[in-house]
Image (tube, rainbow, N blue to C red):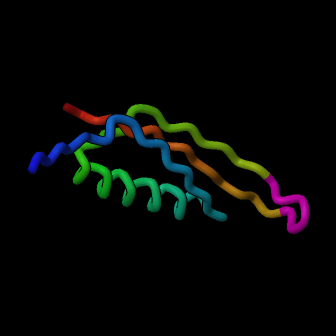
Amino acid sequence: MELHLDYIEDKVEFYEATEMGKLEAIVQEKIEQNKALLLRVHHVSHQVSIDPSSGKRLYSAVVHFRYKG
């Protein structure tokens, strides 16, 4: 029996929060979790938008992780 394991080479995750501090905490927690998978941050992009129905800000981030081999 042959067991073949592949590494995750690229992974993109999306996050949202209603406060910038909460978004930063979420992203930092996910960075730590992905370190266990040997992934490091390659690129981060973030954006602020306004919810038209409530008028509140919505913060979002996209984090691109890459294998650090």
Residue at image x 39%, y 32%? 42
Q: In percent of the image, x 66 and y 64: which residue is there? A: 18
Numbered range of the magenta stretch: 50-55
69, 61: nearer the viewer: 69
Where residue 37 sits in the image (x, y, percent)? 25, 50
Q: Where is residue 2 in the image (x, y as percent from the top left)?
A: 11, 46
Residue 4 lies in quadrant: top left
The foreground one among 60 and 19 is: 60
The x, y position of residue 41, in whole percent, is: 37, 38
Give left or right: position of 38 versus 42: left
The picture quadrant where one finds residue 38 is top left
**Farthest right residue in view:** 53
Q: Residue at x 86, y 68 (%)?
A: 54
In this rendering, the answer to whether 9 lies above or below 20 is above
Q: Is residue 27 left or right of residue 53?
A: left
Q: Is residue 58 left or right of residue 25?
A: right
Q: Which residue lies furthest to the front in this view?
A: 1
- Please say if 69 is above or below 53: above
Q: How many labels does the image show?
A: 0
Question: Does the magenta run of residues contain 51?
Answer: yes
User: Outermost residue toward the bottom?
Assistant: 54
The quadrant of the rendering that contains the C terminus is: top left
Residue at image point 65% right, 54% down: 59
- The dominant secondary structure in magenta is loop
Is residue 57 or residue 34 the one in the foreground?
34
Most extreme residue toward the left, as rendered?
1
Q: In the rendered structure, does residue 26 fall within the stretch colored magenta? A: no
Image quadrant assignment for residue 10? top left
Q: Position of residue 17 (x, y in %)?
A: 61, 62
